[in-house]
Amino acid sequence: MAEFNFVEAAAAGYRFVWRERRSILTLALIPLSVKVGSYAAISLFDMEKNFLRQGLVMLPAHFLEGFVVALVVRMALLGENFTRLFDPGPGQPQQFSESQRRAVMASAAIYLLTKLVCSFFAGSMMTAQTMEPIPSMTPPPTSTLTMTIMLIIFMVWMFRFFWLYVPAAMGVSVRQFLQAINSFYSSFYLLGLWVVCFVPLMGILIGIAKSLLILLGQESLPYMVLIAFIQAVFELGIALVAAVAMGYTVRNVMTGGPGALR
């Protein structure tokens, strides 16, 4: 397969999400509300450092977010219109075809599972860091370095599986997609795509959070409410930009056209 330009794919994702921001906001109002409420519950019950419990609390928000992500991917790649999904108008009920329903629900389920795996992995890493090492069982430095390198290689290879909700949303066979990107180097291109989609928006989010922290103080109620809302908006924005960008990549990979992975 030919290489794909992940910068151009990311730029296409940014352009589409910005151009359709009003339609996307209409679809995302309920998921955003649920996510803000979930963040409020996490803060209220002091679960900021317990990623495993956070994952359970965020289950409804992640499922709804995955539902919206699947709809937006289909809007971008298949030209479908869901702008009146929740308000079709009198005498005009919104109808999902069977293929649309299967694709969207499968994508939302895979998205939810991906989020659960990430929460489990983050929780396991935090637990491992807090455990005190036993001196007699400390492995030699060479063994530790080798295990670290092997873990990094494994995680890079596994990175492709965190995107399976995108081809599922497009109705593309997950097995065929994995066969199309079976090269190990494909994960590096996907990782580059994610970095270009993630870093700019996350940098803006961090800047806003620090400014609010200085102005309002960390323990103040306005700060907690504002940061929960802003974090939910930016996380959804990152998810949408990355998913749409990945959708263009999936289409190029499966058609073998210009910009496909090698």
Image (spheres, rainbow, N blue to C red):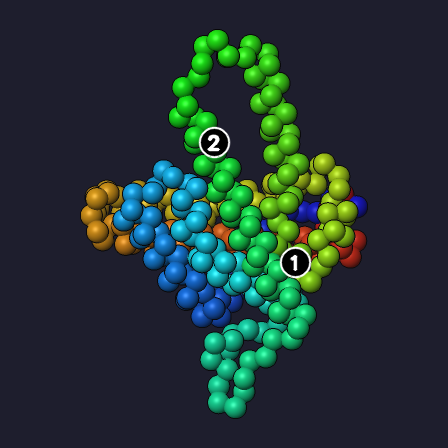
Query: In the displayed structure, does residue 51 sit left or right of residue 97?
Result: left
Please report whichever mark, 1 or 2, sits nearer to the chain's N-terminal start: 2
Count of number-bearing discs: 2
The location of residue 256, given as percent across then percent down, is 79, 53
For label 2, the SS is helix
Query: In the displayed structure, does residue 231 sit left or right of residue 64?
Result: left
x 63%, y 35%: residue: 156
Query: In the displayed structure, does residue 89 sit left or right of residue 168?
Result: left
For label 1, the SS is helix
Which residue corresponds to mark 2? 125
How far is the residue under mark 1 from the one under mark 2? 29 Å
Q: Nearer the viewer, residue 208 or 163?
A: 163
The answer to whether the residue labelled 1 contacts the one labelled 2, judged by CB atoms less than 8 Å apart, is no
Q: Nearer the viewer, residue 187 or 6?
A: 187
Mark 1 nearby-residue class (10 Å; few <14, some 14–19, many ≥20): many
The location of residue 130, given as percent across then percent down, is 40, 26
The amino acid on which the numbered mark 1 sits, given as a three-letter code, is: Ala
The location of residue 198, given as percent across then percent down, is 50, 46
The amino acid on which the numbered mark 2 sits, given as a three-letter code, is: Met
Q: Nearer the viewer, mark 1 or mark 2?
A: 2
Which residue corresponds to mark 1? 168
